Amino acid sequence: MQAEYRQRREQLMAKIGNGTAIFRSAPMAVMHNDVEYAYRQDSDFFYLTGFNEPQAVAVLAPHHQEHKFVLFVQPKDREKEVWTGYLCGVEAAKEIYGADEVYPIAELDEKLPQYLEKADRLYYHLGRDRHFNDKILGHYQELLRTYPKRGTGPIAIEDTGTIIHALRLIKSESELVQMRQAVAIAVEAHNYAREFTTPGRYEYEIQAEIEHIFRKRGALGPAYPSIVASGVNACVLHYIENNRQIQSGELLLIDAGCSYNYYNSDITRTFPVSGKFTPEQKILYELVLSAQKQAIAQVQPGNSFKSVHDTAVRVLTEGMVELGILTGEVDKLIEEEKYKPYYMHRTSHWLGLDVHDVGVYQHGEDKPQILQPGQVLTVEPGLYIVPDTKLAEDQPATDPRWVGIGIRIEDDVLVTATGHEVLTAGVPKAVDEIEQ
Ligand code: GLY
Ligand code: MN
Ligand code: MN
């Protein structure tokens, strides 16, 4: 794996020429008072280094004679390690992570300028920590001030995102191994959750079974707060209270995925808790499923990212017109976004080290993002007939038979050389497979 991290750094260095790039590890996150969450490394930092500790900085300086990859890390500290565990330390970091030079993090201000003063650009992402931003900007200003003395030094700051996020968008074989494992665990959890669900259980009981499987199978935990939404709760897109008792005759929407070695899965299924759809539930479910399948069919190299969403919107809008939920001409309804009260979110996002993974969705208004092998995206259309849906003047009042039904179906899809692979196909979604 170290070879792959090195290869990623080399790809990045090839793009920054005479620049110097600085990456910072994620800070610890506070749960409450002096209790912290389990550590989660910054995805860019992890992608380039594999190093998994806070209080670290990575510097890439391709123009430097000897030190092209430099790490600043916490030094070994026996007393601290007794409380919070192993620290890699300076010596081992050099050995294990292949850095040309490693310093204690306390020496950052002293050692950093030597890696910047010959660079023509500084590559740095302005992060949430204003204090650290100020530190880096302070170095930049100082180098600008002293520029005339040297005639060298960075004269512009560029965000690291455009370069590294374009790399992260295309998954390598080893990344796909991690993602397939994150998917396999979530598939097992969803299939068990469907078996376990009966009317009378509370949503949190289903959540507990799902997250039990995540941990038992070695995932770090949920990739995002699990959504277990019965009945009308399914109309709240990010419903996470999960505290309601499930009633017979309802649908249950489960949106849950796990994080495995930092790689994520993201799956949604909606099924009838009593084993049989009502006629209305079935009609809307079949419509969402048809939209999802047709949208997935668009996932082909050479097609635009946008075509996936456009297809889902068209199928859903046509269906709603047929059912009398919307009236008017389909093209016009789409153009005027009349479907939005019922389908208000996008159909897809990139998936990877982040659940809503990095990478652009279009290159300016007229230049679509074209799908390429190695990209992984979700396809997750839905319909949400919210009770208090406010419709446009020119639309009919929603027939009460549909009201309160919320449905989403979400798969994780890999773009392949010849088309696509639905990574999450192991969780059934056909009506006859999910009815009992
Ligand atoms: N669960 C978050 C999402 O589907 O985007
Ligand atoms: Mn998603
Ligand atoms: Mn989801």
Image (spheres, helix red, strand yellow):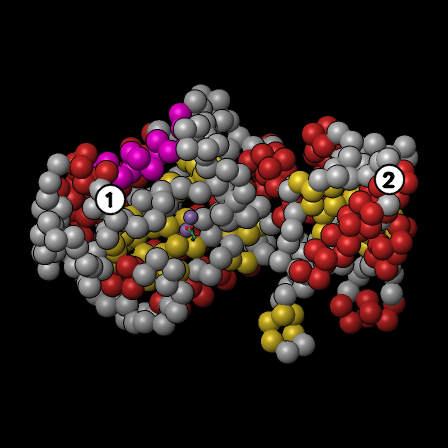
Is residue 99 at least partly visible in the picture?
no
The single residue placed furthest to the front in the displayed view is 148
Residue 241 appears left or right of 97? left
Magenta: predominant secondary structure element?
helix
Is residue 289 at least partly visible in the picture?
yes
| Marker disc for residue 397 | none
Look at the picture and state if 348 lies above or below 270: above
Quarter placement of the N terminus: top right
> Crowding at label 2, few (<14), some or many (≥20) Cα neighbours within 10 Å?
few
- The picture places residue 292, in percent across and down from the top left corner, at 30, 39
Magenta includes 313? yes
- The picture places residue 152, in percent across and down from the top left corner, at 84, 36
Residue pictured at 16% horizontal, 44% vertical = 320
Q: Secondary structure at mark 2?
A: helix
- The picture places residue 351, in percent across and down from the top left corner, at 50, 43
Q: CA distance from mark 2 to mark 1?
A: 56 Å
Report how many numbered discs are placed on residues in the image: 2
Look at the picture and state if 193 lies above or below 79: above
| Marker disc for residue 148 | 2
Residue 184 appears left or right of 298? right
Q: In the depicted view, which residue is nearer to us: 51 or 199?
A: 51
- The picture quadrant where one finds residue 237 is bottom left
Magenta includes 46? no
Task: Say what amino acid the circle numbered 2 marks.
Answer: Pro
Q: Are marks 2 and 1 in contact (CB under 8 Å)?
A: no
Residue pictured at 86% horizontal, 71% vertical = 79
Q: Nearer the viewer, mark 2 or mark 1?
A: 2
Residue pictured at 63% horizontal, 38% vertical = 164
The segment highlighted magenta reads: 303-317
- The picture quadrant where one finds residue 160 is top right
Q: Residue beneath label 1, please? A: 337
Determine whether the beta carbon of the residue marked 1 sits less than 8 angstroms from the nearest atom of ligand 1: no
